[in-house]
């Protein structure tokens, strides 16, 4: 049953064993780094453990009962993921190591489709995972790399003139991991498709936090990671339209993804098997399915509403502190629950270290988005990122810790 109305955060927190622990100096853990990786509820931990205790076998191999059960669990997880993002078929879901590998799979697969004179269009607000693979594709093919620029508030300047008949692929984040900015992906997809270009969306920061339907999104490919949405580390997802996946060659090769092997040559199975060589990560798939069941029960609209409330509180609380600058939009319009900020006179790493001493876990640095930081006039920032288990009391703890950091460094 899906939850209706505000989330019961106290009940949610009880499902996360790690949130009950203390950290430095015996302080309670205030975990504000879900943009890097989310914590895991007991249901996910149980699903992984139960797989190893009762069903452990190599999926898609063997005719014994355990092998059949492992295959059912793995393919059941694929169906669960497909339903979560509105895919037309489970066969549109490819399991990868993470979102980074999923993006690289597409970038590698397009190598034979691009050449000099063609253009790859990305944005200045991307995580390195959705920037560097396209740089490498441009180097391999002689294509030209172009990008939508960031505006001073961190939002995206969607210049339609950059989308031309030479554009072959447009890659854009679904939500910035630094500023929380949510670009107009559907509009960008429309422009791209009118020009005959493909569209890839990096959904690592969007799929965990608000409803995502691939039909409404208008993309050809969507990449995301299980570990940022309550699931286990080591499993990512590439969704692709069936015809788009069919057109891609294998990225990695080995067992399980072959049709016929002879000493002279090999032919390959259709997607998704073509892109999943080796023994499948069934335990991680079981964990991801449990995570999706957990989020689905909460309701993704409720998840998004809770995070918006936390973000609004954080923006107000931090902006009330003299010398604190929000990196990116200062309102919740078209932005998610990642708030990057700077403290005048204090390096972000020093801010993070003081916050850690108080039990507040945040991320510091350029967050694998160096070009965006340069565009916004800073080399690094401190970032707090929120999820379903965070409370308004923790937002106040963040603000108190920032005030203490200012006092500690005498600014």
Image (cartoon, rainbow, N blue to C red):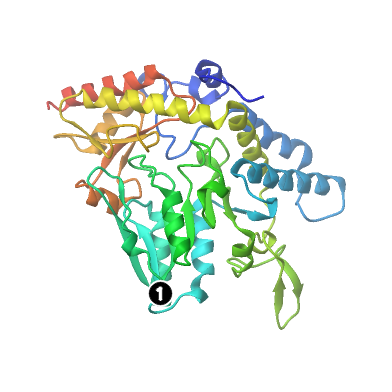
Q: Which residue is mark 1?
A: 118
Which residue is at 65% across, 34% downward?
290
Screen quadrant of the N terminus:
top right
* Furthest-bottom residue in this view: 264
Task: Assess disc 1: are there few (<14), some (14-19) or many (≥20) residues with their C-alpha within 10 Å of its C-alpha.
Answer: some
Where disc 1 sits, the SS reads: loop
| Image label count | 1
Q: Is residue 339 left or right of residue 404?
A: right
Residue 3 in picture, x, y percent from top left: 60, 22
In which quadrant of the rendered view does residue 255 lie? bottom right
* Furthest-front residue in this view: 194
Which residue is at 54% across, 62% downward?
105
Which residue is at 33% across, 23% downward?
313
Q: Is residue 179 above or below residue 7?
A: below
Q: Is residue 281 left or right of residue 185?
A: right
Q: Is residue 64 above or below residue 116?
A: above
Residue 382 in picture, x, y percent from top left: 29, 36
Q: Is residue 131 left or right of residue 89?
A: left
Screen quadrant of the C terminus:
top left
Q: Is residue 397 left or right of residue 228?
A: left
Residue 349 in picture, x, y percent from top left: 26, 38
In which quadrant of the rendered view does residue 192 lie? bottom left
**Can see residue 270?**
yes
Residue 102 in picture, x, y percent from top left: 53, 56
**Can see residue 401?**
no
Which residue is at 62% across, 33% downward?
44
Q: Nearer the viewer, residue 253 or 102?
A: 102
Q: Is residue 108 above or below residue 223?
A: below
């Amino acid at each position: 049953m899906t939850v209706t109305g505000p989330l019961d955060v106290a009940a949610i927190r009880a499902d996360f064993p790690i949130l009950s622990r203390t950290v430095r100096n015996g302080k309670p853990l205030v975990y504000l780094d879900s943009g890097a990786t989310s914590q895991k509820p007991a249901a996910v931990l149980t699903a992984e453990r139960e797989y190893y205790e009762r069903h452990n076998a190599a999926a898609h191999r063997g005719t014994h009962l355990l092998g059949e059960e492992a295959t059912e669990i793995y393919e059941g997880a694929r169906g669960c993921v497909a339903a979560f993002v509105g895919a037309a078929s489970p066969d549109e879901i490819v399991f990868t190591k993470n979102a980074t590998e999923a993006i690289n799979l597409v970038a590698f697969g397009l190598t034979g489709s691009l050449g000099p004179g063609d253009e790859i269009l990305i944005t200045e607000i991307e995580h390195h995972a959705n920037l560097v693979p396209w740089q490498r594709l441009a180097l391999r093919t002689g294509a030209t790399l172009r990008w939508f620029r960031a505006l001073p508030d961190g939002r995206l300047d969607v210049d339609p003139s950059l989308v031309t008949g030479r554009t072959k692929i447009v890659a854009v984040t679904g939500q910035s991991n630094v500023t929380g900015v949510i670009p107009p992906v559907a509009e960008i997809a429309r422009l791209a498709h009118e020009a005959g270009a493909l569209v890839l969306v990096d959904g690592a920061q969007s799929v965990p936090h608000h409803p995502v339907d691939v039909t409404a999104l208008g993309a050809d490919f969507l990449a995301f990671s299980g570990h940022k949405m309550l699931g286990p580390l080591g499993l990512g997802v590439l969704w692709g339209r069936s015809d788009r996946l069919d057109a891609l060659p294998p990225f990695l090769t080995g067992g399980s993804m072959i049709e016929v092997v002879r000493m002279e040559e090999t032919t390959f199975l259709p997607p998704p098997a073509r892109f999943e060589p080796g023994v499948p990560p069934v335990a991680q798939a079981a964990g991801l399915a449990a995570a999706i069941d957990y989020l689905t029960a909460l309701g993704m609209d409720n998840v998004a509403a809770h995070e918006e409330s936390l973000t609004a509180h954080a923006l107000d609380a931090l902006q009330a502190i003299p010398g604190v600058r929000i990196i990116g939009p200062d309102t919740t319009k078209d932005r998610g629950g990642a708030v990057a900020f700077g403290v005048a006179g204090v390096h972000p790493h020093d801010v993070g270290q003081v916050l850690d001493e108080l039990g507040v876990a945040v991320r510091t640095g350029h967050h694998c988005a160096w070009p965006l930081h340069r565009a916004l006039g800073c080399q690094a920032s401190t970032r707090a990122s929120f999820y379903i288990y965070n409370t308004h009391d923790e937002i106040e703890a963040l603000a108190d810790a920032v005030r203490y950091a200012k006092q500690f460094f005498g600014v």
